[in-house]
Amino acid sequence: MVKASTTENPSQSVSPMQTFFIHLICGVGLAVGLWVAHNFYSISLISDPSRTLRLIWVTMCPLVILFYSCFRKNPEKCSYLKAVIRGVLALPIGALVNALGAIALGAPVGIQYFPKTVNWSLLMSLFTFVPAASVFGSSWEDWRRIFAHTKPNASVDYMICLPAHGAVIGAWFGAWPMPLDWERPWQEWPICVSCGAMAGYLITMVLSFVLVLARGRQQHPKAD
């Protein structure tokens, strides 16, 4: 029984090299979005957070959806195109959930904040909802296991679970300086929250790769 529960499903088997490649692509996509904003539009998260966030999520969106869809659950029943469509549909749904969560926790509400909140929420959806939707679809059991119980089993679970939690926790820590009376421009919504989310996302991607690598070595001991 114990052995069966720890055996990875072949359809969701992801090698450490594949994990490294996916995380590298996503990280490069994030960096390219920031680079394009700075070099082509002369903007940054501080000077124009809304447009900068839009450039980042627009750059990352096709990369996240197209590559995570390759590791969809039950590929014999779910085509690649269906997984891609699930990821596309999850983007606005995840953005709505993230926006409502942020507002419930104190994010400012108003017309002047609306574009910032929308673009921040879309980026957070790419960090959290979209990979899970592309891989698991509407499997409530997998969503609950990954997000509610934080119990990753397969390598692909670590690829989804850790960066998603890292982005949320990073955003939460990033929000701490906002109410402080420092009068710094980066304290405005959603600048420091976005920086925290991206930092948490990148750090936990590295951690995810390390855990997948360690897991692979445990499951493939030396023949002798």
Image (cartoon, grey):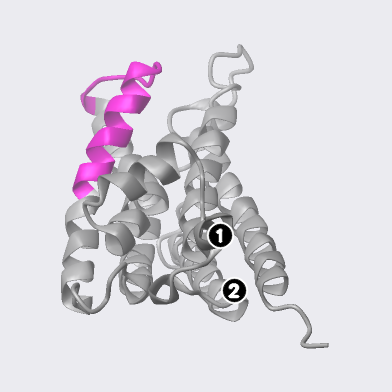
Residue 19: x and y in percent read: 55, 72
Report the side of 156 relative to 104 (left or right). Answer: right
In the displayed image of the protein, which residue is found farthest to the front?
1
**Which residue occupies 22% across, 77% down?**
80
In the displayed image of the protein, which residue is found farthest to the right?
224
Q: Amino acid at mark 2?
A: Phe
Q: Which image quarter holds the C terminus?
A: bottom right
Q: Secondary structure at mark 1?
A: helix
Q: Nearer the viewer, mark 2 or mark 1?
A: 1
Secondary structure mostly seen in magenta is helix
Residue 69: x and y in percent read: 31, 71
- The answer to whether any part of residue 48 appears in the image is no
Earlier-in-chain disc, 2 versus 1: 1
As rendered, which of 167 and 112 lies closer to the eye?
167
Report the side of 219 relative to 64 (left or right). Answer: right
As rendered, which of 205 and 52 lies closer to the eye?
205
- The answer to whether any part of residue 152 appears in the image is yes
Relative to 196, say whether 163 is above or below: below
**Which residue occupies 57% across, 31% down?**
174
As rendered, which of 47 and 72 lies closer to the eye?
72
C-alpha span from label 2 to label 1: 22 Å
Q: Pointer 1: what residue?
A: 6
**Which residue occupies 38% across, 75% down?**
11
Give the magenta range. Answer: 92-111
Q: Amino acid at mark 1?
A: Thr
Relative to 99, say whether 125 is above or below: below
Query: Quarter of the image holding residue 213?
Result: bottom right
Query: Quarter of the image holding residue 169?
Result: top right
Q: Mark 1, residues whose alpha carbon is within 10 Å: few (<14), some, or many (≥20)?
A: few
